[in-house]
Image (spheres, helix red, strand yellow):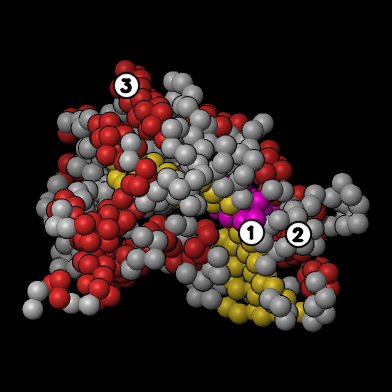
Amino acid sequence: MNFTDLPYELRWLILEALADDCRITRGTSDDGLARYVTVCKEWQTILEPEIFRQLIISASCLEYLDMIVGRNSNRRRLVKHIWLRVEFPGYPCGSCVFEESDERIKRNNRAVTRAIYHLFAILSHWESSGPSSPRDGITLELSIHSLSDSKHHFQNHNFSAFHYSEEDDFSENPLAVRLSPRRYDGFHQWESFGSPEHALSFDPFHMNLLSRLRVHGQPISLGEAPPTVEIVRRFLVRRQFYRELGPHALRRIFRALPRLEHIHLECWRSVTHELEFKKNHDREAIFRPYVPPALRRLCWYDDDDSYYELLGTEARQDSPRLAAILVKVSRQLESLAVSFVIDARDFFRSFYPGRVHISEKKYPEFPRLESIALTSNELSPSESSENINNLLHAAGNAAARMPSIRTMELWNGQPGEAAIFCCNRTADAVTISWLTTWDIPLEPRVITAWKNVGIQHRLYSLIVETDRIPPPPICPGSILRHLRLQRQVLHPISLYQIQREADEAADAQAWAAAYEI
């Protein structure tokens, strides 16, 4: 029996299975799947949507994007996701312990500017509506790294490209996790641990500060504003890559994307207090005065990998002015998830008890907001019970000004301590849950504030759940799994990565303690 003798439905299922297998196993090349497209028209019809669904493109390949996809309306409508990878030249080992020179920084800025400008110039000709355009627009993902970033002190980091779907099981994709060096490299602090499971140990405390600055690089600035693009609906930067666009570059990009609906930024904290202070100040300009008019979802996560960073969680700097800006932005949003960028205390400042009566018109209102997740340093056993309850009271007052709210989650975590407050509204009831690693009761005024939220939705009973959770050995990876809004706080790949890293670090700590290493 020939393949063509099979029923059409069965042939379709076989080719779909082939496409799924190729998507999971292929790396930066589409050759494995593309070669099957040339078999016949039927195969092309089934396989091309998978080939062009997600395009991974380096700066040197942009002209091919225009030739192969941009000028073919049938292929343009298949594109859902474009991942632009800007790769800087490598650097020798002798340079890995020195900060980038001013000339190298200028070259990097020019390289990113050229790549983004070229891509936007191509996409500016893609129709945002009509038969040749993707129905829901496209996601634009951006990553920046040097070819040498994983060859020195950061040998267990993976900057490879891989095709993915957000519904994938990332445990089956080796490219989705950090690598495990298998060679001794004393110069870069990779030393033998003596265990088969932990063959090599990294000593971050003896890493040269400049080597950290090298892999992070300087925030990228754009030399000129890119052309306007209407086809992009979502902008994505994942934590897998350390180098990032500076705040002023982000502002230029967002201005060039007038139909942007979803911004997802995962950044890393700076390695010095001075750089962190400057970045926090410059961030105020990202959404001031311009906010993409179609923006409905904002996810912003500042990662704090204490295994590598010099700054601890206790050194996070407050950004009350940025919080005030995000309050204004949130009035047009449906979903907001901001973690370790601002403090929830500053976001809810206008709602604190005694400030403004809830019925007054100058009280901020969030008509579209359905979910919100924020972090706060107030949720800590080092804070007083009054301060913690003031925050939860203010959050209840704010929720009363969110007529569409479904879920609000406030959380915080450090090694050995964590707290999660969650309000979830269904058609039948409003439930608040309070999970902590220490005993801290909710005061009656907090309960009353959240009862009022339910009353506004004709839900007259409030369910209150309190529980203790085990102290997390590693944060935030150990605490994220308890969040109801975890997939809004982090991209699914990043969520898997950070939880796996936390598990591996906890195992390594337990093994080292057992053998007194």
Asked if labels 3 and 2 touch by Cβ distance under 8 angstroms, the answer is no
In the picture, measured across the screen, residue 40 lies left or right of residue 429, that is left
Q: Which residue is labeled 1 in the image?
A: 372
Q: Circle 2: is it few (<14), some (14-19), or many (20+) Cα within 10 Å?
A: many
Where residue 287 sits, quadrant-wise, is top right
Kindly tell me whether residue 27 is visible in this rendering.
yes
Which of disc 1 and disc 3 is earlier in sequence? 3
Q: Eyeballing the image, is 473 above or below 467?
A: above
Q: Circle 1: is it few (<14), some (14-19), or many (20+) Cα within 10 Å?
A: many
- Image point (59%, 72%), residue name: 436
Where residue 393 sits, quadrant-wise, is bottom right
In the picture, measured across the screen, residue 514 lies left or right of residue 330, that is left
- Image point (47%, 27%), residue name: 227
- Mark 1 residue element: strand
Marks 3 and 1, how far apart at CA? 39 Å
Kind of residue at badge 2: Met
Q: Which residue is labeled 3 in the image?
A: 107
Asked if labels 2 and 1 touch by Cβ distance under 8 angstroms, the answer is yes
Across and down, in percent, residue 65 comes to: 30, 37
Kind of residue at badge 1: Ile
Q: In this orientation, which residue lies closer to the viewer: 435 or 284?
A: 284
Marks 1 and 2, how far apart at CA? 10 Å
Q: Eyeballing the image, is 250 above or below 232?
A: above
Please tell me the numbered disc located at residue 402: 2
